[in-house]
Amino acid sequence: MKERIELALTKIRPALQADGGDVELVDVGADGVVRVRLKGACGGCPMSQLTLKMGIERILKKEVPEVTSVEAV
């Protein structure tokens, strides 16, 4: 599952990098909770929660149905 999540994140990264940010996979729990670290401009952006839930989480759940939620660490 971790490999499929990494593959999905490579599809998301160009949009984040275009705004000076990035995302790093930290951990995948047995419960389907994915923990990521937002980096660069995304780390301190006031819209980061929206990016996390409506962007990253939505795409990961679509690409990897076992994902239950995405959390920033």
Image (tube, rainbow, N blue to C red):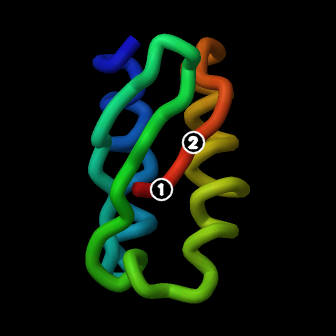
Q: Which mark is residue 38?
A: none
Identify the amino acid type marked 2: Val
Asked if residue 13 is positioned above or below residue 21 in the image, the reply reads: above
Q: Nearer the viewer, residue 19 or 42?
A: 42
- Nearer to the camera, 71 or 14: 71
Locate residue 12, reporting x and y percent. 44, 51
- From the viewer's perspective, is 17 left or right of 55? left
Residues at badges 2 and 1 in contact (C-beta under 8 Å)?
Answer: yes
Which of the 4 quarters of the picture holds residue 10? Answer: top left
Q: Is residue 64 left or right of residue 38?
A: right
How far apart, in angstroms, are the residues tagged by discs 2 and 1?
Answer: 7 Å
In the picture of the structure, the residue carrying the numbered disc 2 is 70
Q: Which mark identifies residue 72?
A: 1
* Residue positioned 39% across, 48% down in the render: 36
**Measured from the top left, where is residue 61 in percent x and y?**
65, 29
- Element marked by disc 1: strand
Q: Amino acid at mark 1?
A: Ala
